[in-house]
């Protein structure tokens, strides 16, 4: 890539010296480049695959040209290692001269790229990561995923109102896990709930078994769980093996642990689990039914919430380019994105013009079996939820 660009610029230079005006065959101005940085390998690979799939699907449906420009996606696998994210972002910006960086499977990856987006003055579209602080790290960051605060506050209030008095918590030991824990605790204890056990597990290859016995012994009414997308299946397997379901200890939490792409593999131990989240494959809108059917047809699995973050992220990029008439100036693109509203497979969403963060419905859902498959069935909606976790200025 570097060699090709280098040669092209040499050729362009020669044309100028000779005083000849030539139309170069593939001028950068005719295309829009999106550098997509995702974990395609390692423990977070299901996030990368969902987002990559959803972007492919969107481009199949909407074409690969927008505002007269050809959209070129350059995918780099960072394996969810923030140093690799940074190197990938640098290469994409300096060598490939991308107009956007996008993706970011985990919070540390989104944070690692933030100073580079600021320096290059190009949008960083966060399609997966969920810690509140992220959008405050660069004026060029816009988020189409979610924040843990959005769902954890709501499940905290729900637990209090539904007779849950004692909770043991198990959260992944990094920034979004801490957001989930803190926002849940704030709401749950303010309503009179009590935390009887608190456990943090490592992000990489967690073994839940040693902690589950402690959870069981603390005899909670429920356990609050946050594990990132991709880990819910192994968590629920160990939860059932240790007999916590039989002991009547229900799982509650943000919906990451009940991700739709893994839910069917969890078996009946997942039945009845109540979580608060932003997307369910069972969301009853026509748009979602079409989205799920098209995704399944192409990729033979259900889309989960990460897929929707990617689908909406590429939509935001397309619509911003339409608004700027194809102008790729980063400040103009960010201005175009602020306040944008649209219907997503998850329901109505918008970009908060003040914070560049997503405003969306949060649904309370319960796992039920329909036609032999497990689904998160939505039964209560909290409309237009903003992130509760922004630093007060
Ligand atoms: C994050 O690292 O911000 C993250 C990753 C996966 C999730 C939620 C948050 O499911």
Image (spheres, grey):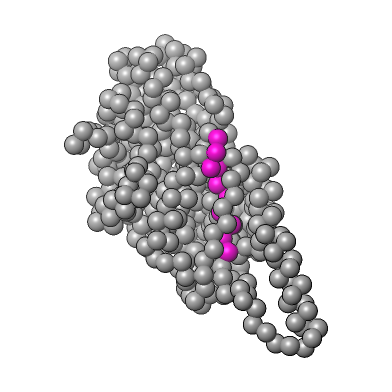
The residue drawn where x is 61% and y is 67% is 330
Q: Is residue 78 above or below residue 199?
A: below
Identified at 77% across, 72% down, the residue is 10
Residue 242 image offset from top left, x and y in percent: 39, 14
In the figure, 351 relative to 42: above or below? below
Q: Main secondary structure of the magenta part?
A: strand
* Count of numbered badges drawn on the protein: 0
Relative to residue 188, is residue 283 drawn left or right? left
The residue stretch that appears in magenta: 33-42
The picture quadrant where one finds residue 55 is bottom left
Q: How far across and how far down the image is residue 208, in percent?
A: 48, 20
In depth, the one of 42 and 17 nearer the eye is 17
Give the quarter of the figure containing the N terminus: bottom right
Residue in front for this viewpoint, 375 or 183: 375
Q: Nearer the viewer, residue 147 or 330?
A: 330
Residue displayed at 27% across by 34% down: 374
Q: Which residue appears farthest toward the left when viewing the image? A: 371
Left or right of residue 147: residue 303: left
Can the viewer see residue 37? yes
Q: Is residue 95 left or right of residue 248?
A: right
Residue 41, magenta (yes or no): yes
Q: Which residue is at the front of the view, 218 or 194?
A: 218
Q: Residue 67, how many percent across, how many down?
A: 48, 75
Where does the image place residue 86, in percent across and percent down from the top left? 67, 48
- Residue 104 seen from this side: no
Q: Residue at x 49, y 76 (%)?
A: 68
Q: Quadrant of residue 5?
A: bottom right
Question: Where is 269 relative to 39, above or below?
Answer: above
Is 105 part of what is drawn in magenta? no
């Amino acid at each position: 890539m570097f060699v090709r660009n280098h040669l092209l610029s040499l050729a362009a230079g020669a044309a100028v010296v000779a005083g000849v005006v030539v139309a170069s065959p593939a001028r950068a101005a005719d295309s829009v480049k999106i550098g997509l940085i995702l974990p395609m390998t390692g423990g977070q690979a299901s996030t990368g695959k969902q987002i990559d799939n959803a972007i492919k699907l969107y481009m199949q449906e909407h074409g690969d040209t927008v505002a007269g420009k050809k959209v070129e996606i350059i995918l780099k696998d960072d394996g969810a290692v923030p140093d690799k994210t940074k190197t990938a972002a640098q290469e994409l910006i300096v060598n490939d001269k991308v107009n956007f960086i996008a993706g970011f499977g985990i919070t540390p990856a989104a944070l690692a790229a933030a100073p580079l987006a600021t320096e290059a003055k190009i949008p960083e579209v966060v399609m997966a990561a969920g810690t509140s602080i992220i959008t405050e790290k660069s004026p060029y960051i816009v988020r189409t995923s979610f924040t843990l605060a959005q769902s954890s506050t709501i499940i905290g209030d729900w637990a209090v109102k539904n007779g849950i008095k004692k909770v043991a918590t198990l959260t992944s030991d990094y920034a979004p896990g801490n957001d989930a824990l803190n926002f849940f605790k704030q709401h749950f204890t303010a309503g009179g709930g009590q935390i009887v056990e608190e456990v943090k597990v490592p992000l990489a290859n967690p073994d839940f078994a040693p902690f589950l016995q402690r959870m069981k012994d603390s005899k909670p009414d429920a356990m609050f769980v946050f594990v990132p997308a991709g880990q819910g299946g192994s968590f629920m397997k160990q939860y059932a093996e240790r007999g916590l379901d039989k002991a009547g200890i229900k799982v509650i939490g943000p919906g990451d642990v009940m991700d739709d792409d893994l839910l069917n593999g969890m078996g009946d131990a997942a039945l009845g689990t109540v979580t608060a989240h932003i997307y369910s494959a069972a969301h009853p809108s026509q748009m979602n039914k079409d989205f799920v059917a098209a995704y399944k047809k192409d990729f033979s699995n259900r889309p989960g919430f990460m897929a929707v973050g990617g689908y909406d992220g590429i939509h935001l990029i397309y619509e911003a380019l339409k608004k700027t008439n194809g102008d790729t100036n980063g400040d103009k693109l960010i201005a175009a994105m602020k306040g944008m509203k649209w219907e997503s497979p998850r329901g109505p969403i918008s970009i908060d013009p003040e914070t560049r963060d997503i405003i969306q419905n949060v649904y309370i859902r319960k796992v039920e079996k329909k036609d032999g498959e497990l689904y998160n069935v939505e039964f209560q909606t909290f409309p237009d939820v903003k992130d509760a976790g922004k630093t007060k200025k």
